[in-house]
Image (cartoon, rainbow, N blue to C red):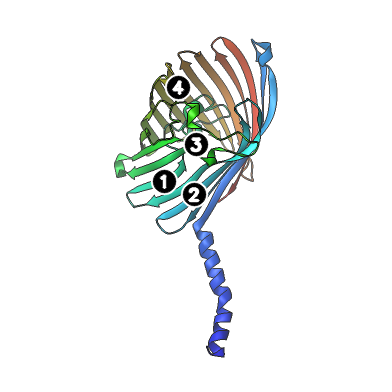
Amino acid sequence: MSKTLTAALALGAPFVICASGALAQERFSWDGEIEIGYESIIDSTVPANEGDAAYATGEFNTAFALSDRVTVFGGLTFEELEDASGTTGYGFYLHELGLQFETGAATFQLGKVSPAFGTAWVSAAGFYGAALAEDYELTEQIGVLAEADLGAAGTLALGLFYADDTGLSDSLGFNRGRNSSAAGGAGNTGKLNNAALQWSGEWDATFAYAGVRFLSAGVGDVGDETGFVAGLGHSLGNGLDLFGEVAAFDGYGGTADDATYATLNAAYAIGEVTLSGTYSMRDVTSAGRTDLVSAAAEYELANGMTLGGALARIDDAGTKDTLLGVNLVIPFGG
């Protein structure tokens, strides 16, 4: 090789490295948030319920595009965990990890995923906005998801899955223990014999969705679970957003119970402040009815952080608690 060519390659190497680094940076994305909060039961008809606790949680999500059509994704959660004995402590676990494939008309995910069934946990505003609805959120599942773009007709999402019983169900820091299909529970089968299907659509300032799910009985369960969910949201354009979601289940959790949930939420934005109110209900055959009413306020700081607080009144099968919650949410990434 000539000295001239060698010198040219040597001089060009930093530019090649820079270009390669820039390309890698374009393909890499990440985001997340840290939440620091305090919650207290300030009054209860059962005095032993009264108490308070500070907490911290964090969620970190990342993706790297291997090509225009294939992406590796992952998500890490930090929060207080509980093991089989009821002992608690803070630890980390992977809530998602897998591959995503784009085909144009559809997107597929394979790995540890979160099947679509409801949206209250992201759509309802306020500290206690989704406090009851989170009961039926589908997370930490091993399976295959598909999402098809139907154009003006909306989007259709389908998932086949089972509760994660691999090493990914364990945690670092506090050890919550690895999940096992031998523990039972609807959907905890170790087989792809559980499914969720959800349609969603959006028109101007309105969005709606409806979904169904089937979770096969696990070891020791009474029977299979079937569930239905539907939601509707609308922005009035004057700072007021309305949202509602209902869900109903037969054989809830693999038991003989029926269960019904409802969440109604309104949020009003005034500059950097958002005021919200929530009514939610849960009715489970063996546990009775729970009603929650809450009022909340959130203030977005100049640096993107959000400071929030809320009061809630809960009537849980006759036990009435008054709750206070405050938090600081710190977003990051991009």
N-term mark: 2 or 1: 2
Q: Secondary structure at mark 3?
A: loop
> How far is mark 4 from mark 1, CA to CA?
31 Å
Label 2 CA crowd tier, 10 Å (few <14, some 14–19, many 20+) = many
Q: Which residue is mark 1?
A: 109
The relative height of residue 186 versus residue 8 in the rendered view (above or below) is: above
Closer-to-camera residue (320/173)? 173
Q: Mark 2 and 1 residues: CB-CB less than 8 Å, in contact? A: yes
Asked whether, in this view, residue 295 is left or right of residue 211, the answer is: right
Q: Which residue is mark 2?
A: 73
x, y percentage for residue 31?
56, 47
Label 4 CA crowd tier, 10 Å (few <14, some 14–19, many 20+) = few
N-term mark: 3 or 2: 2
N-term mark: 4 or 1: 1
Q: Which residue is mark 3?
A: 165
* Dot in front, 3 or 2: 3
Residue at image point 60% right, 42% down? 33
N-term mark: 3 or 4: 3
Residue at image point 53% right, 11% down? 317
Closer-to-camera residue (205/207)? 207
> How far is mark 3 from mark 4, CA to CA?
17 Å
Q: Which mark is residue 220?
A: 4
Residue at image point 42% right, 55% down? 70
The relative height of residue 12 versus residue 126 in the rendered view (above or below) is: below
Q: Check disc 2 and give the amino acid type.
A: Phe
> How far is mark 2 from mark 4, CA to CA?
34 Å
N-term mark: 2 or 4: 2
x, y percentage for residue 292?
54, 19
x, y percentage for residue 325?
64, 26
Q: Secondary structure at mark 4?
A: loop
Query: In this orientation, does residue 107 appear?
Result: yes
> How far is mark 2 from mark 1, CA to CA?
9 Å
